Amino acid sequence: MNWQTVLTELAQNVDDVNDEALLGLVNQSERVFLAGAGRSGLALKSFAMRLTQLGKQAFVVGETTTPAITASDLLVIASSSGETTQLVQFAATAIDVGATIWLWSTGTDSTIARQSQFVTLLAGKSKFADADTATKQPMGSLFEQSVWLFGDIFTMDYMQRYQITESFMKARHSNLE
């Protein structure tokens, strides 16, 4: 069954990467900006929502209400290749203002990875990968799933580390639904 393939691929590629440095990075950042393209960007939006519910100021890059990034902010980029043109430009802008960059990717040999202070490797393949890589899933599906799940796992670790309850988060949940 295909659902077993997806779960098996995700389970084989999961590392415990939410160390104190990454939890502290998010906690100490004044604001968190999140950028991704396509389905990776959609998955990252779910993490932006959770960050807001955790009490952080979180902004999705490209939305009309997103303010200017500054040196006290964090830019989280999800890019399997680390070479998406628009995301490379976002990283360059963040560097220009002195913001910190945290890349979620499938490799460390990319333009954005070289510009980032933090890189987290997630399961999946880059758009430049050969079709016969370790995943049976098409295109970037495994990476996109990894982005979503990593955001949820990070949220749980952050809640535990900073003693944030679900009721605290529920109070920050959208009520204009």
Image (cartoon, rainbow, N blue to C red):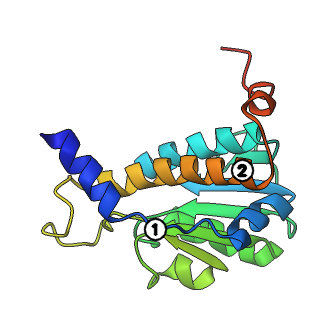
Secondary structure at badge 2 equals helix
Using the rendered view, name the quadrant where residue 101 is placed. Answer: bottom right
Q: Residues within 10 Å of mark 1 (few under 14, many from 20)?
A: few
Which amino acid type is marked by label 2? Answer: Gln
Q: Are marks 1 and 2 in contact (CB under 8 Å)?
A: no
Of circles 1 and 2, which is in front?
2
Which quarter of the rendered picture does the C terminus lie within? top right
Q: Nearer the viewer, residue 30 or 95?
A: 30
Residue at 76% in and 67% down:
25
Please indicate, yes or no, whether residue 89 appears anywhere in the rendered image: yes
Please indicate, yes or no, whether residue 37 appears anywhere in the rendered image: no
Secondary structure at badge 1 equals loop
The CA span between labels 1 and 2 is: 18 Å
Task: Report the disc number at residue 31.
Answer: none
Q: Residues within 10 Å of mark 2 (few under 14, many from 20)?
A: few
Task: Report the disc number at residue 15.
Answer: 1
Residue denoted by label 2? 160
Picture coordinates of residue 115, whole percent (x, y): 62, 82
Residue at 35% in and 65% down:
13
Sooner in the amino-acid sequence: mark 1 or mark 2: 1
Q: Nearer the viewer, residue 108 or 95?
A: 108
Using the rendered view, name the quadrant where residue 83 is placed. Answer: bottom left
Q: Is residue 167 left or right of residue 43?
A: right
Residue at 86% in and 70% down:
71
Q: Nearer the viewer, residue 110 or 48?
A: 48
Picture coordinates of residue 59, whole percent (x, y): 73, 46
Which amino acid type is marked by label 1? Answer: Asp
Picture coordinates of residue 79, whole percent (x, y): 47, 64
Using the rendered view, name the quadrant where residue 4 is placed. Answer: top left
Which quarter of the rendered picture does the N terminus lie within? top left
Q: Is residue 60 above or below residue 161?
A: above
